[in-house]
Image (spheres, rainbow, N blue to C red):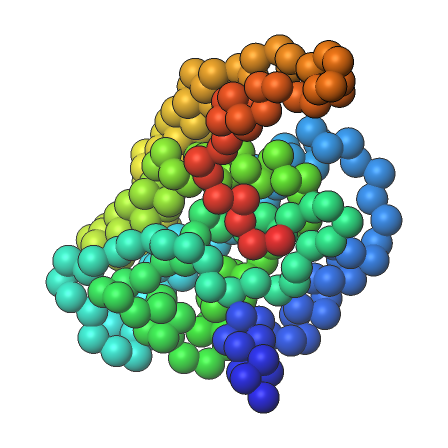
Amino acid sequence: MAKSRRQSRTVPDRDEARIERFRHKLIERFSSDPDRALEHGLARNGRVAEALCFMALIRDPARRRRPMLPVPNVGCTAAVRQFFRADGGEQAAHLLPGQLSIDGIFPWLFLAGPAARKLENLFAYVEPLRADYNKADSAAEANGLTDAFADACSRVLTGRGAAEADIVAAYDRVWRPGALAAFRAADEQKRSKPTPPPVIRGVGLEYGMILNFDESQEACADEFDLGDP
C-alpha cells in the first residue's frame, strides 16, 4: 500500500503516463545520440514556453483559486513528478529544469479543472537519454538553469502588460540568455576538471593491479547528481 501511495504522488496522470511510455519506450527510434540531445533541448524550450503561458493564467485573479503574494516567491527545486523511469542504461531526463513553486506551493494548486492537471503533467514529462547527457543537464541546472526558469516564470507572474507580450519578454529576455549562460558555465566547469592520470599497473606480484586507482577515481569524480533513472 505504501508503494502505491508513493507512485500516485510521482505519476500525476496514469493515462498520460501510458502514452508517454509508449512514445518513448516502445516506439523504435533511429536518431543519433547528439540528435536526441538536441531534440531534448528544443523540447525543453517548448515546455518552458508552455509553463510561462500557465503563469499568465495563474496571475489572472479570475482564474486563480488561491491567494498569491503581490510579489510571489518563485523557486525551482528537484523534480517530484515523473511519468516513467528509463532502462537499458539510459536515464529519464526531465524536460523542465525542475519543480517550480510559488510561495512554497505547487503551481497547479493555483488552478482548477483541466488547466491544473495539464500544468501538473507538464512537470512530469521526461525523455530517456544516455547518462552523460543527463549529467550535462544536471550541470547546467546547478549553474543557473533552474534560476533562469524561476526568474522567467516570476517575470510573467508579476507582469502588468498584455499576457502575450509578457510571456514573449520573459522567454526572450530572461529564459534564453539565462539558459545559454548556464550551459556555458557548465561547459567551462566540466573543461576545468582535472583529466585522469595514465593508469599505472603493477609488475611481479602486483601484475595487472592498478597502482594509482584512488588517484584516477578522484580525478574522475563528478560532483553532479545523475538524476532519477
Residue nearest the viewer, comparing 117 with 78: 78
- The answer to whether one can see residue 109 in this image is yes
- The answer to whether one can see residue 45 in this image is no
Q: Quadrant of residue 145?
A: top left
Residue nearest the viewer, comparing 172 with 95: 95
Residue drawn at 79 percent across, 36 percent down? 31
Q: Is residue 184 above or below residue 204?
A: below
Q: Quadrant of the N terminus?
A: bottom right
Residue nearest the viewer, comparing 33 with 205: 205
Instruction: Give percent across and percent down for residue 216.
Output: 56, 22
Instruction: Give percent across and percent down for residue 189.
Output: 41, 22
Residue drawn at 34 percent across, 53 percent down? 76
Residue nearest the viewer, comparing 90 with 54: 90
Residue drawn at 73 percent across, 62 percent down? 21
Can you name the residue that lies furthest to the bottom here? 1
Instruction: Give percent across and percent down for residue 202.
Output: 69, 15
Count of numbered badges drawn on the protein: 0
Can you name the residue that lies furthest to the front here? 205
Q: Is residue 221 above or below residue 105?
A: above
Q: Is residue 76 above or below residue 209?
A: below
Instruction: Give percent across and percent down for residue 113.
Output: 46, 81
Residue drawn at 73 percent across, 53 percent down? 87
Q: Quadrant of residue 29?
A: top right
